[in-house]
Image (cartoon, rainbow, N blue to C red):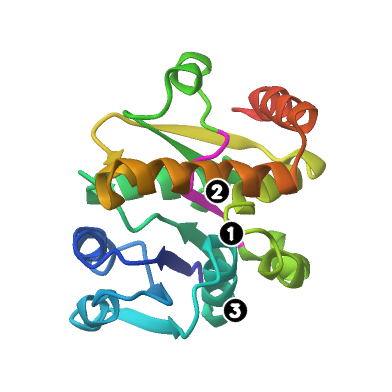
């Protein structure tokens, strides 16, 4: 029987995660929703706890997205994994279905979203290589969880890209024309937002070089179905 685990990492997302949970906890293709409170200092955990269909995992300290995802995967029981960011705007059940079906039907080995507010270069080439919304088989990550747990906070997506390229995986890009994301400057203010974006770029640089990034983009583009 096909089973799907949805994993949502969250750090200080009390104002936003409820909208994502409202969609995922009632979705017919999702068997379990695991929301990981990554050491939040707001009431993210209490918002998650209001949803009966959500399993709350609380990390005492902020580990970053990679660590939070890893904690969620270790708790998950599904054959397939759906990763969603907690700050999505405009997410619908249809969007989730579109991201899940190519992989569940065996037409693709992984799917990656392309949101309406993705950077212009990514929309131009039809690929957001840093998208946090993905579907893939659990066994693709089974042997890599210890490595993922030690990745820099925002190094997860580039590591997943490497796994897809190494496996020559069939990748479906799913256009989400109605879905956006709250960016850091809006969440934390201009200066803190700039600092957060810089930290994210530094984490990515720790995981992959500029040349490696270019290689990933070209390779993923060729793997699209």
The stretch of residues the image draws in magenta is: 129-137
Residue 1 location (% of width, % of height): 51, 72
**Rendering coords of residue 140 (x, y %):** 70, 59
Judging depth in this view, the residue of 38 and 138 nearest the camera is 38
Residue at left offset 62%, top offset 65%: 138
Considering only vertical position in the picture, is 113 above or below 60? Answer: above
Q: Observer-nearest residue: 50 or 94?
A: 50
Q: Residue 71: percent from the left, percent from the top?
A: 56, 76
Query: Which residue, given by chain and number where applicable, does mark 2 sit on?
Result: 199
Mark 1 or 2, which is nearer the eye?
A: 2
- Among all residues in the image, which is located at the extreme front? 191
Dots 1, 2 in contact, CB < 8 A: yes
Residue under numbered circle 1: 153
Q: Is residue 140 visible?
A: yes
Q: Do callouts 2 and 3 mark residues in contact (Cβ within 8 Å)?
A: no
Give me the residue at 50% from left, 32% from top.
Answer: 173
Residue 208 lies in the magenta-colored region? no
Residue 212 placement: quadrant: top right
Quarter containing the C terminus: top right
Residue 202 lies in quadrant: top right
Q: Which of marks 2 and 3 is in front?
A: 2
Pick whichever of labels 1 and 2 is earlier in the sequence: 1
Question: In the rendered image of this protein, does residue 183 appear above or below residue 148?
Answer: above
Asked if 165 appears above or below 49 in the picture, the reply is above
Residue that numbered label 3 is attached to = 74
Q: Would you identify the image quadrant in which residue 208 lies? A: top right
């Amino acid at each position: 029987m096909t089973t799907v685990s949805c994993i949502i990492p969250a750090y200080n997302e009390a104002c936003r995660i409820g909208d994502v949970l409202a969609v995922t906890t009632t979705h017919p293709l999702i068997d379990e929703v695991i929301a990981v409170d990554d050491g939040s200092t707001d009431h993210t955990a209490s918002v998650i706890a209001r949803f009966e269909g959500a399993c709350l995992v609380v990390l005492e300290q902020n580990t970053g997205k990679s660590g939070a995802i890893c904690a969620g995967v270790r708790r998950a029981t599904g054959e397939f994994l759906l990763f969603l960011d907690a700050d999505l705007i405009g997410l619908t059940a249809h969007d989730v279905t579109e991201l899940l079906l190519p992989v569940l039907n065996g037409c693709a080995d992984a799917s990656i979203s392309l949101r309406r507010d993705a950077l212009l270069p990514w929309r131009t080439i039809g690929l957001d290589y840093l998208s946090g919304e993905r579907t893939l088989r659990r066994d693709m990550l089974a042997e890599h969880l210890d490595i993922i747990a030690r990745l820099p906070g925002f190094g997860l997506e580039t590591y997943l890209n490497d796994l897809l390229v190494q496996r020559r995986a069939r990748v479906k890009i799913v256009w989400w024309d109605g879905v956006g994301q709250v960016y850091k400057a809006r969440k934390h203010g201009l200066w803190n937002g700039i600092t957060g974006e810089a930290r994210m770029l530094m984490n990515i640089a720790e995981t992959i070089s500029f040349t490696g990034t270019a290689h990933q983009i070209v390779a993923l583009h060729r793997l699209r179905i």
